[in-house]
Image (spheres, coloured by chain):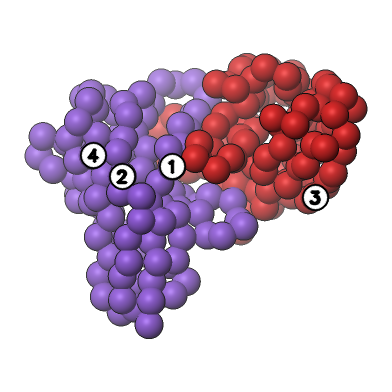
Chain colours: A red, B purple
Amino acid sequence: DAGITQSPRHKVTETGTPVTLRCHQTENHRYMYWYRQDPGHGLRLIHYSYGVKDTDKGEVSDGYSVSRSKTEDFLLTLESATSSQTSVYFCAISERPDALYNEQFFGPGTRLTVL
Amino acid sequence: DAKTTQPTSMDCAEGRAANLPCNHSTISGNEYVYWYRQIHSQGPQYIIHGLKNNETNEMASLIITEDRKSSTLILPHATLRDTAVYYCIVRRHTGTASKLTFGTGTRLQVTL
């Protein structure tokens, strides 16, 4: 399995508080992604990074920010958590953006509950 | 990226072939078909992808129709561990970060 860890694995927090989720990789892959997964929606991309300090928005980026100061770490921050952000969050990595072969490796997920 | 349509759920007996269909009637010529699966409580796992030729690897086979409007993922000898949600994804290779758009997938239940 690709070396991807997420922390914390579970978190319960209250509405209005900031929350930061961490994704750490040991594969030295350039590209990193944050997805959220909700019933009836599949996985949806929040933000992604194509290098250190290089990030861009996905399809559901409102209310989230990201930072990548090192190749191995990609942080997702909920600036002021809301109940609609209760979800399972997955981090993914890939070695190259596009090629004949494009595989993303996913982390184990973080279950976040906002009360 | 083109939209995909998959059945919500399917059953398959262990040891038999599981054939999972995907409709992507609006696919364009430079879009690839990808399959991922997600076993309960785990992150998604890449299975296979293709452009227009049929593909096979150690996990599965991918059959793409000649007009490319649909495809079928085949697990030749399904086991209980293949019980998962299977996602069919269609996307271009744009040269930038490889964003995947997942739909709701097909829940495959493999039974004894």
Can you tell which mark lies on residue B89?
Answer: none
Lower position in the chain sequence, tag 2 or tag 4: 2
Q: Report crowding for label 3: few under 14, some 14 to 19, many 20 or more residues within 10 A (C-alpha).
A: few
The reply to the same-chain question for discs 1 and 2 is yes
**Residue under label 3:** A10
Can you tell which mark lies on residue B6?
Answer: 2
| Mark 3 → mark 4, Cα distance in angstroms | 36 Å
The reply to the same-chain question for discs 3 and 2 is no
| Mark 3 → mark 1, Cα distance in angstroms | 23 Å
| Mark 3 → mark 2, Cα distance in angstroms | 31 Å
**Residue under label 4:** B23
The residue drawn where x is 62% and y is 36% is A36
- Amino acid, disc 3: His
The residue drawn where x is 61% and y is 35% is A35
Discs 2, 4 touching: Cβ within 8 Å? yes
Discs 1, 2 touching: Cβ within 8 Å? yes
- Amino acid, disc 1: Thr
Where residue B110 appears, as percent x and y from the top left, is 38, 71
